[in-house]
Image (cartoon, helix red, strand yellow):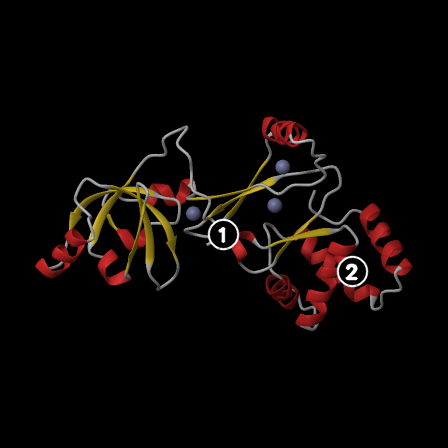
Amino acid sequence: MKTLHSKEKEQFKKLFGQEGIDRFEDRLKVLDVFWQMDGHPTAVGVHEVLVDEGVKLDPDFVRETLKLMCQLGFARRSRFGNGEVRYEPLHLGQHHDHMICTKCGRIYEFQSDPLEALQIKIAEAHGFHLLQHRVEFYGICAECLKERIDRMPLDMARPGERLTIIDFTGGTGARMRLMTMGLRVGDSVEVITNINEGQIALAMGNRRLVLGRGLAQKILVRPDRVTPGRPLSHNAED
Ligand SMILES: [Zn+2]
Ligand SMILES: [Zn+2]
Ligand SMILES: [Zn+2]
């Protein structure tokens, strides 16, 4: 099912010829490998598979070919959560959206007719004619949730996650600092940003708090179950 159909090969040949694009046979090798790959590879990822299969092509050539494929409607590109540029084959007449796990980075595909219909309705209510859309859910996937423990340091929490503070570790100094910031055991907080090794921004009610990573490691939290109907924050891009 995932092999390149002769029909697609024909279209590819025709369009690339029409556009006067050179090195057709090499481009076809890229398309062939790309079409068979699962998921949403980067140009580097596609190049690696080509190398594994003994096809020697320049990484820049591979990247350029993938860009051309997007231009000619054979692929689409996405930068989920401002990450690296990723490509996926564009199958005509098929559509899906994505869920991206902010913990492990896995990308899941889904298709929902009610969601598609709702988007058109919302657009129409604004007098807007919807042509295209991208729906991206950011959160924690089922696999990662399984590994979640009910007691973890705050620095492991992900943006958008709501948590209850259950304990403070560390010495009296750290406890005092947290107390003066207004944090107490039993408080509910929501993570706004948590970027790599940097600070962690939290929302507590209408207040914003910024903690250093060291201090955040001393706060033990329990992730809340998602409560339906509660507004979610929109900070996934951070
Ligand atoms: Zn959609
Ligand atoms: Zn995950
Ligand atoms: Zn996809």
Determine whether, in the image, residue 74 is placed left or right of residue 238: right
Where is residue 151? Give x, y as percent: 23, 45
69 or 202, nearer to the observer: 202
Residue that badge 1 annotates: 237
When the figure is inspected, residue 219 is found, relative to residue 92, above or below; the finding is below
Mark 1 vs mark 2: in front: 1
Is the CB–ligand 2 distance for label 1 below 8 Å? Answer: no
Sequence order check, earlier mark of 1 and 2? 2
Where is residue 82? Give x, y as percent: 54, 57
Where is residue 155? Give x, y as percent: 29, 55
Marks counted in the figure total 2
Residue 187 location, quadrant: top left
Determine whether, in the image, residue 52 is placed left or right of residue 28: left
Residue that badge 2 annotates: 28
Which quarter of the frame holds ligand 3?
A: top right
Where is residue 202? Give x, y as percent: 32, 50
